[in-house]
Image (cartoon, helix red, strand yellow):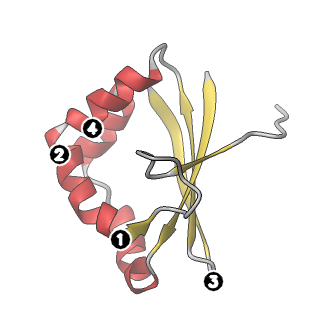
Amino acid sequence: MQRIAQIIKVKPEDIERYKEIHQAVWPEVLAAISHCNISNYSIFLREPENLLFAYFEYHGSDFAADQKRMAADPKTQEWWKITDPQQQPLDSVAEGEWWAPAQEVFHVD
């Protein structure tokens, strides 16, 4: 199992809507997440900086392939058409990144 953390900004004018839609994530999107070997997925909001911090656990053997499978899912694409415009990548992301990866520096079971 691999623990993964990511960070992105949410646009101030979209915070309430972002929270609202995440209270009722579509079942098809939840199924795609699970199908792509992701569990224990959480997104946290830090205000007033408007930072989203995502954490999830990956239980598969090919993260890149599972990410491609998720990106190819039509219902997930529809979901992202709603959520992506509400987000703003950090200035420091690499070319092609959306959510910025965060390095794990401490963990205890």
Q: What residue does disc 3 label?
A: 48
Q: Position of residue 98 (x, y in %)?
A: 43, 52
Please tell me whether mark 1 sits on a helix, a strand or a loop: helix
Q: Secondary structure at mark 3?
A: loop
Q: Closer to us: mark 2 or mark 1?
A: 1
Q: Secondary structure at mark 4?
A: helix
Nearer the N terminus, badge 2 or badge 3? 3
Residue behind mark 2 = 75
- Residue shown at the point (35%, 77%) measured from the top left: 17
Identity of the amino acid at label 1?
Answer: Gln
Locate residue 90: give its quadrant: bottom right
Asked whether disc 2 touches disc 4, contact meaning CB atoms under 8 Å apart, the reply is: no
- C-alpha gap between disc 1 and disc 3: 16 Å
Specify the label residue 86 is tagged with. Answer: 1
Q: Amino acid at mark 2?
A: Lys
Q: Are the residues flagged by discs 3 and 4 in contact, CB closer than 8 Å?
A: no
Location of residue 72 with respect to 45 vertically, above or below? above
